Image (cartoon, rainbow, N blue to C red):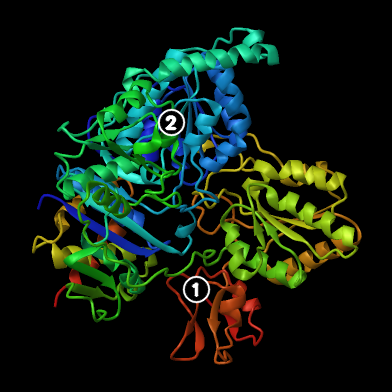
Amino acid sequence: MSERMLLLGNEAMAHGLVEAGCNVVASYPGTPASEILSGVAQWQARYRLPMHVEWAVNEKVALEIAYAASQAGLRAATAMKQVGLNVASDPFMSAAYLGVKGGFLVISADDPGPHSSQTEQDSRLMALSAKVPVLDPDSPEQARELVKIGFELSEAFEIPVMLRPTTRVCHANQDILPGPVTPSDRTAVFEKNPSRWAATPKFRHRLHLELEEKLAKIAAWEPTAPRLLNPAAPARRAIVASGVAAAHARDVLHDLGLWETLPLWQVVQPYPLHSSFVATILEQYDEILVLEETTGVMELQFADRYRVKGKRSGFVPEVGELSPELIEGLIASFAGIDAPETPAPSAEGGRRPTLCPGCPHRASFYAIKRAAPKGIFPSDIGCYTLGINLGGVDTVLCMGAAVSQAAGFYHAHKLGGVVPDIVATIGDSTFFHAGIPPLIDAVVQDARFVLVILDNATTAMTGNQPTPALGWGAGGVPTATVDMEGLVKACGVKFCKVGRPGNLSAFTDLMKEAVAFARTEGLAVVIARQPCVVDRTFKGDRPPRRKAAISDACNGCRYCTTQFECPALVYDEEEKRVVIDTLICTDCGVCIDVCPRLAIEEVGQ
Amino acid sequence: MTGQQLIISGVGGQGILFLTRILAETAIGQGMPVMTSETHGMAQRGGVVISHLKAGEFSSPLVRPGRADGLIAMKEENVAIHRHFLRPGGWIVVNAKAAPADLDGHPVHAIDADLLALELGNPQSLNLILLGFSLARLAASGNLFCTADQVIGTIERRLAEKGKLRDASLAALRLGMENAAG
């Protein structure tokens, strides 16, 4: 491949992985990391590489699968979003002590903002906590470069290495000249060494000492040392930046006319910060400005913070993304010059996200609200979080928590003697990811609620990755399947029924039956099965189309726009009635059964 | 022109990622460095989405407020939300029945792309109708870094193996161009 091509940061990292001869990659999708694994699968197919590439059931499993390949001497990587690393933190922390054989890269994508996450947590802080070196790229191109450097670092010191891109790297596109791909000639050889690979606490103490020795050497490793980006004019002040903040700072210094006079140090390895850099930077300059996202991880490592301006000093905000306009203001203030005025938006917000027109989840939430009008509705992580717009979502905590929270609400209320209806919702992929252990717990503890598994046959929010029930994996390769109903029943659930939410009246009846069962008998599971409306990978039959039209009986009561909240139903302020936006309507026909005045009618195609 | 910064704004599902990609690949075709920044995740479900596109020598993928040369708004309401990104005199192309008023002297070009997409029987063609219109209005005067012919070349290359999609895309682009007179 010899032409510059437009690559998403995630695709660029994927290309770096195949350039580095990575043998095994496992991931669970999550914004902003999802396209890393699909990128790897794409390059694997294009270059016909003998690799194992998989969408794992969750991040913990993904990390462990990749780590075992590394223990057997192969190069391996795992990719996830930052909250996925929370799920995988158990093996991550332990693997730091045991170390690696083949290069092992943990890509954890952060989401300062946050744009599409529960938290703004900084994976670099997790790396610091685990005592794992972390690399922080400023662009898709540098992310690709650091994948390769990361493998070298990992193998040089037999240690896991974290690569920490952020949303602005993952979801930036850049013109990139991909490097050559040489298929790996490694074969797996697991060398037994129980005192290392199965270390007991006594051996763990020694491994911890070795880990500290590795870190001291890594803090002097030349290829990841801080880089001075501009001509080193004699200066009293300097900027130290990592990640995309360094890219913003570079443009801002040019625009403010400071490029020749204000030194900009880019740190690509924020932990461990190079010891000679820590020792000399504060001798070299009177004052440094530290720009990094999201926590002051570099800042923490400067022994004398008296002359450091950063997050802990209160100079740089602790919360939110470091936008280029924010950085412009900070740099101007640091340099003692006036910043150009930043124009403010003339209108805030705009329309909120909603479930797509024709989305089966909308029908599910509508039915749930009819079956349990005063219920408590724990929900989970996925598109269906948007059921909040329909009043069908009361809680969102983390992957799988809908099930455990439903059980928790049951036990808590039972203490007071009055238990409300509890209807929890969880997506199919999320159920497989983290919903099964709490379901077993709920059965064993006799927690009585309804769990609705919103089975749209895909992992929708992140771009329609497969689930374990579908029979195909990364890159479309065939896999075995797991039967969802069988799994639910094997957990001990006595009521497990399947319905199609788009068939609204029958599905509402099913929901009522499940709610009645939960009141008197025990836990009920309803599988709401209907394919995602935007999933182009879906191969089965779609439900029949029912074209709707609004008759003169519409009196503009807005019941449909507020209670059903389909974006294709629009209230026309001039006509004082609802109209259908035919540009986005999918002819699902569910709204026909929603209007209390029967003013939405089925019409011929 | 040494570099150009554009904002493309709309609502999830309108095809903003594809429009941005076509422009960025056209920049590469001209030998320009290019960076874009996209919206993924929950906002793609009908929320406000924005793409930044920077063709030329830049490090940061984001356009700062007050710096964009142009704004392509696929919804009229997005002009108010994102026009602060424009530099003084930066142009606006908007999908609207009529040009919005009071835009601080920004040159504005309006087209009812919703209507044209419905007439074409292809609601997904909205993005390329707007792009064709933008090219016809702005490329000749040097206000856009690429020409319609260059974009047509990009679409033909990119969709070479998808004949039907390529033809539909080019038809939409041309429909936008044809509606740029006046």
The answer to whether the residues at label 1 and label 2 have Cβ atoms under 8 Å apart is no
Q: Chain of mark 2?
A: A
Would you identify the image quadrant in which residue B90 lies? bottom left
Circle nearer the viewer, 1 or 2: 2
Q: CA distance from mark 1 to mark 2?
A: 53 Å
Residue identifier under label 1? A568
Mark 1, residues whose alpha carbon is within 10 Å: few (<14), some, or many (≥20)? many
Name the residue at 48% across, 47% down: A31
Which kind of residue does numbered mark 1 sit on?
Ala
Q: Between residues A217 and A56, which one lies in front from this camera angle?
A: A217
Which one is nearer the viewer's eye here, B177 or A344?
A344
- Give left or right: position of A534 versus A431: left
**Which residue is rendered at x = 14% and y = 74% of the image?**
B181
Element type at mark 1: loop
Q: Is residue A22 above or below residue A172?
A: above
Residue A301's mark?
2
For the question of whether residue A50 can be seen, the reply is yes
Crowdedness near tag 2: few (<14), some (14–19) or many (≥20) residues, C-alpha within 10 Å: some
